[in-house]
Structures are given as structure tokens and as C-alpha cells.
Image (cartoon, rainbow, N blue to C red):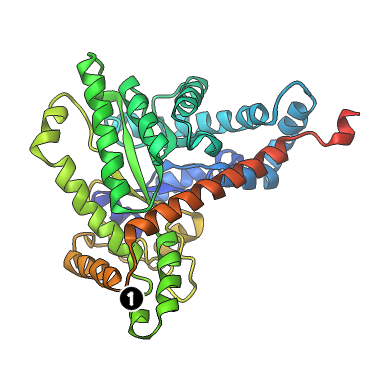
Amino acid sequence: MNPLLQLRAQGQRVWLDNLSRTLLREGALKRLMEDDGVAGVTSNPTIFFKAISESPYYREDLARLKGDFRLPPEDRYEQLAVPDIQAACDLMRPLHDNSGGNDGYVSLEVSPALAHDSGKTVTAAQRLRAAVNRDNLLIKVPGTPSGLIAIEELIGQGCSVNVTLMFSLEHVREVAQAYIRGLERRTQGGGDARRVKSVASLFLSRVDTLVDKKLEAIGGEALILRGKSGVALAKLAYQEYKAIFRSAGFSLLAERGARPQYPLWASTGTKNPAYSDVMYVEPLIGAETINTLPDATLAAFRDHGRAGLTLEQEVDAARQHFESLARLGIDMRQVGETLQAEGVKLFAQSFEQLLALMAVPVQETA
């Protein structure tokens, strides 16, 4: 049996970390849904830059948009991206409906340049939500301090949110509480919590990249700890998830139709070639979770992945790993803050690169 389909049987959903008109128009995304059980799609500025710059299906529309000199680059980008998001949402709508609103979501990110401005993030999210106008849309908002304020506000308004750029257990707790506060605002105001969905995207491979560098700087016996921090983080994050969303406190919201905020494993492509290409999949399989996979990782797991309920195995070892890091002076909270700050900068740079692709060359405006 296809190992990807076995993940679904274990209660985990697979999302594709990619989107393009090539995937949509040539039927590849539909086949991934049918053959591999792909149940959602995530996008970001880097994904759209690659799609728009490489796929032939954008050329005519891009040329037309560049012909309108009144349009700013961000408007041109959105006029290309929004129809793709709508098409993916429509393709996944039957899955969304048949699952009672649990599956079949497509994510669209607000401008990373707004990561430290909660008000503008809310305004941008509202605008994108209205432009797409699909129930199975998730607006991606970073889990920065300003992002947490925006998340609470958006959830309170009934906007479904994919929280991105999370790198620590502190981020997991803070994001969950922002979501719960938003749900409380929604239900206290008479709103319907049943139509609100949120996932919490925890980035894994970047954690190992940074922690491994710190371990290599220490050297000696510290080297045996390399390549284990991302998986340990996810295992401990799942324990946090259970403590929060299976608690008596959340049950009051659940009685009003509120959904738990599923953990989503992000940044699951292995960056170090010395490590297994499915190292962020095989050990992290469990119910009420999502793993968003880039194409290469999805293909690798389909080819040689092993599916089993592994997420709650070796949880004590994960705690011991964090304790060992602490004894070496590696503060995982600080690691998380450093990575989030770097992630905001990298995403903003990717967005600027995307807008440059949308811009009209100077000679064309003469």
C-alpha cells in the first residue's frame, strides 16, 4: 500500500507545500489528491516566484498586467495568485465538504513585510479573504508578537488562519492561546465557531540547521546530538497540543463547535544530505496532525517511507535531548526567537524578489 495513504489511516493529513498553474492545469494536483491522499496545499512568496518565473501558463497574464502601468507590483502579483488559490480551493472543495470542514484547505500568505504591524496584517488578511472568497481558504499569518494580536482579531472575526514561522515550544503555547482568545471573542459575540479553522505551522529543518551549528562549535560528545532537535521539538509540541486542546478548559469551546488548532509540521525537506530524506515524516506520525511536504519529500516517502504511529514514541528521549542542549548552554527559546527573526527577513526578501518580477522594467515605461 502507498505509505502516504497509510498516513491518512493513522489520522495524519498530508498537504503539498507547492502550488502552480502547471500543477493545476496539467492535472498533477488532482492526481496527488486521488493517488496519494493529499488533503491541502500551502503557498508562500518563494513558491509563487518559482511558479510565475518558470511556468508558461503565467506569461500571457503577466504581460497583460505589466501593460497596465497604473498597477503596483503587489496588485499584479495578487491578480496572478488569487485565481490559482481559487482554483485549488475549488478542486479541494469536495474534500472539504465531505470531511465536515476538516480537510481540503489552501493557504495564502499576507505580505511578510507586515509581520510587525498587526493592524495592517488584519487589513491585508481581510482583503485577501474577500478576494479569494472561498470557505476553505487559510490566511497565513506569522506567529510574531504583532502576528499574535492579528491572529486573535482574525479568529474573532471568523477568518481561518494558518499560523506560520513557529520555531519553539513558547511559540506553540503563545499561538494556541491567541487562537483560544479569538475563539472566545467569536463565541461571546454570538459568532459561529464551527466555520473557523486554524493550524499551527512548526518549522523543523531550520531548527536542526541552527542547533547543529551550535553543537559543531562545541564539538566533542556534543556532536552525537546533531540532527535530533527538530523531531524532538515536534514530539514535545504535540504533548503541548494535547494538554491545551484536550483539556477541560477547551472542552467548553468545543461544545460550541470550536475545532482544535492542529499542529502542522513545516520545513520538512531535509537540508543536510547526511540525514534521511524522510526524517521529518517517519518519526512524526500521529492523529490530529498535518505534515506539509515539498514535492521531493512527498516522492521520497511514497517510495520508501514507513508509516506507523510514531509521534508519541520516545517522548522522554525528546525531553532528555532538550535537557542535554540546555546543559550545553543552548537555549531553545532563544533558538526559536533567532529563527523567527531570520524567517521574517527571509520571507520579506522573497516577497521583494517576487515584486521585482512583477515590476515593469524602466525602459518599458519610457
Percent across and percent down for residue 161 are 38, 33
* Residue at the image position 69 percent from the left and 31 percent from the top: 73
Residue in the foreground of this view, choosing between 59 and 362: 362
Q: Which residue is situated farthest in the top direction here?
A: 190
Q: Which residue is situated farthest in the left direction here?
A: 248
Q: Answer with the quarter of the image where residue 316 lies.
A: bottom left
Left or right: residue 323 compared with residue 344: left
Mark 1: few/some/many CA within 10 Å (<14, 14-19, 20+): some
Q: Can the viewer see residue 317 in this picture?
A: yes
Q: Which residue is situated farthest in the bottom direction here?
A: 220
Question: Eyeballing the image, is 141 above or below 349?
Answer: above
| Quadrant including the N terminus | bottom left
Left or right: residue 225 compared with residue 270: left
* Residue at the image position 43 percent from the left and 73 percent from the top: 275
- The amino acid at mark 1 is Leu
Question: Eyeballing the image, is 144 above or below 274?
Answer: above
Q: Which residue is situated farthest in the front direction here?
A: 329
* Residue at the image position 18 percent from the left and 40 percent from the top: 245
Percent across and percent down for residue 229 are 33, 66
| Quadrant including the C terminus | top right
Percent across and percent down for residue 258 are 21, 29
Residue in the foreground of this view, choosing between 82 and 351: 351
Left or right: residue 110 compared with residue 148: right
Q: How many marks?
A: 1
Percent across and percent down for residue 160 are 36, 29
* Label 1 element class: helix
Q: Can the viewer see residue 99 in this picture?
A: no
Question: Eyeballing the image, is 12 above or below 297?
Answer: above
Left or right: residue 4 compared with residue 24: left
**Which residue is disc 1 drawn over?**
225
